[in-house]
Amino acid sequence: MMAAIAACACASAFAGAESPATFRQRYKLDPVQERENVEQVAKDAAAAKRQDAKLAYYVVPAMGATKRLSGTYPVDGRPFGTVSWVAARDEYEPASVQFFPYQDEDKVEIVASDLVGKHGAIPASAVDFAVVKIWYQGGSAWYGYFHDNDHPQAVPELLLHDENLIRVDDEKKDYYVRYDTPGVNTGYWQWMSARFEVTDYRIDGQALCPHMIHDADAIRPFALNKHEFKQILATVHVPKGAAGGVYRGTIAVKSARGELARIPMRLRVLPLDLPEPKTDYNPDKRYYLCMYGSVSPFPKVNRNLAAHNAKTPMEFPRVSTNEAELAKQLANAKEWGLDAGPCFAGIEGCMTQTSIPMTEKDKATIDTARAKYAALMKAARKVFGEDFRAFSSGQDEGPLWTVKGERNIWRAAHEAGLDIMATTFYNRHFLCDLDFFVQPGMPVERRAENVRLFHQMNPKGLCGWYANPHCGPESPDYMRRIHGLMAWKAGYDVSSNYCWYRSNWNDFAVPFEPQMRGLVAVYATADDVIDTLAWEGVREGLDDIRYATLLKQTAFKALECRFKAPAAYHLGRAALGYVAHWDGYRGDPDTFRKECVNYVLKMNDLMKETK
């Protein structure tokens, strides 16, 4: 019944909205703002001597803090500019362009050429295009994560290959998601922004049928609306073996009436390979992106995680005594690009609380647990290697008395070769038994002291953060900073926010934590996820750490050249000074990354004479 009502409502809301050529998503424009935009775009076209262009376009920062809506003029954009990337080998790097059409355009296609340079070519398939879909989310959207159904906000978030997957009713501030079964039916649009207050509300409004949601593998033709800005994200994946240098190409923009624009592309491939991220305080210690809700059986999902630097998903591998199953997980990790360890929360939890002192019954329980953990670790190390590290989880957000009661089973787990992780609050008396301390709250300065003290208690221990904010804020700049250099500079080892994804597409009816918005970074589909600007921001944050790691590693090599290459030695000291004093809370990460590249290239040149 509810599905039928939703389908009828959607059909009514979009009657006449879809042409035979392409689905047309319209947003209401403010007449005054529209007029001002037309005047400003005309000035930009005249300044660029492009008055005869069939449409205007602006190259804009891909990961900026600006909320790019259909009527918002891109003050930070370059009119008729070049889509540019600077990236290391095997790096993913985003760029973005906004179109401003002078008339409605049907069946718009964007097609990249190969990128050609002095040392060869990078195929057009290395560039992925996605429409940045604007839809409605809760009133605290863009930066917040708390529930507010009374003030829906239009926000750019989803990265879609097929824009018709999501339909937005701009008048009612609702959205609908296409459900279909390939080869069986052509689909219908499920009302996905229904509130709990709707009569006969059903859980169908939570996308609990992700197997019926399918995006395309590559961008499909879309429509452009007269005087509406539309944003496209263009992400390049530089091949592993690409030679350093500049590569150029073009992006052809075509519609039903012919070619609308030809946008130049420029890719500078750095002669560098980015290392795995390391912590700021210890150059030999790995930094991890391990988000709650990231375990999946689907290859596409796991490859997506690996491509975003999340190579240690929570609860993977899943430890058991079944060696054949463990070997299969090891093979999957290699195929998907994941690491087969350390294993976070992928083993039976350590949540048993005992009396202090323990009773005889407690002792028997602990002895049984110790034997079980020992058997699990024996099997795991036989398959994954003697250095395999697995973390069993304690009670989530346990108060101090809970942590105190768990210490006996934690010590038994230690004796069996396990480590312990738990979300809790700082306390010097009990956290000495914790190996992975997940501290609630974003990595701000007042928590950095707790991190420092925890590491002094447990030098091999890990400290991570989650919450405040949880996942949910759509701003890529915000998510990049807090998951990247902010946490790194504060001394953390892990960004482990909650949560990466689950079957919750409805921001206005969240059954899990009703005081919150839908706390997800991506959206589940049949066998994959829908990426978002926020998730791309998280990848950029981890890449920022990788650039910082490369700078420090290069600087340490330069310090060894004090007499063979004194100029490199002094530049290495300057580079380490730059990183030490860079403000991870307020500095611009793009500027930081450029300075890292400059230092690394100069140090490498100066050290050539020592080889």
Image (cartoon, grey):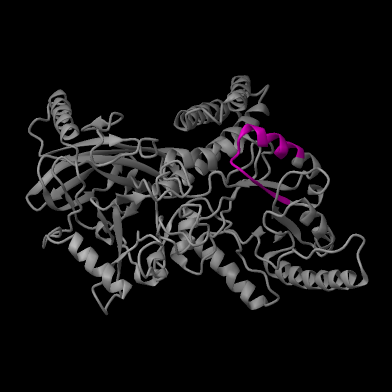
For residue 203: magenta? no
Name which quarter of the figure residue 284 lies in.
Answer: top right
Left or right for 512, reference 409: left
Left or right for 358, reference 22: right
Q: How many marks?
A: 0
The residue sitting at 73% across, 66% down in the picture is 381
Q: Position of residue 494 (x, y in %)?
A: 62, 47
For residue 439: magenta? yes
Q: Check the image and report above or below for 135 versus 195.
A: above
The residue sitting at 67% across, 76% down in the picture is 323
Q: Which residues are magenta?
A: 436-453
Name which quarter of the figure residue 364 lies in.
Answer: bottom right
Q: Position of residue 521 (x, y in %)?
A: 46, 52
Q: Position of residue 554 (x, y in %)?
A: 59, 33
Q: Is residue 246 visible?
A: no
Left or right for 408, reference 521: right
Q: Quadrant of the N terminus?
A: bottom left
The residue sitting at 63% across, 23% down in the picture is 573
Q: Check the image and report above or below for 75 versus 25.
A: above
Name which quarter of the figure residue 324 lies in.
Answer: bottom right
Closest to the observer: 130 or 199?
A: 199
Q: Position of residue 53 (x, y in %)?
A: 10, 36
Q: Quadrant of the C terminus?
A: top right
Q: Is residue 352 visible?
A: yes
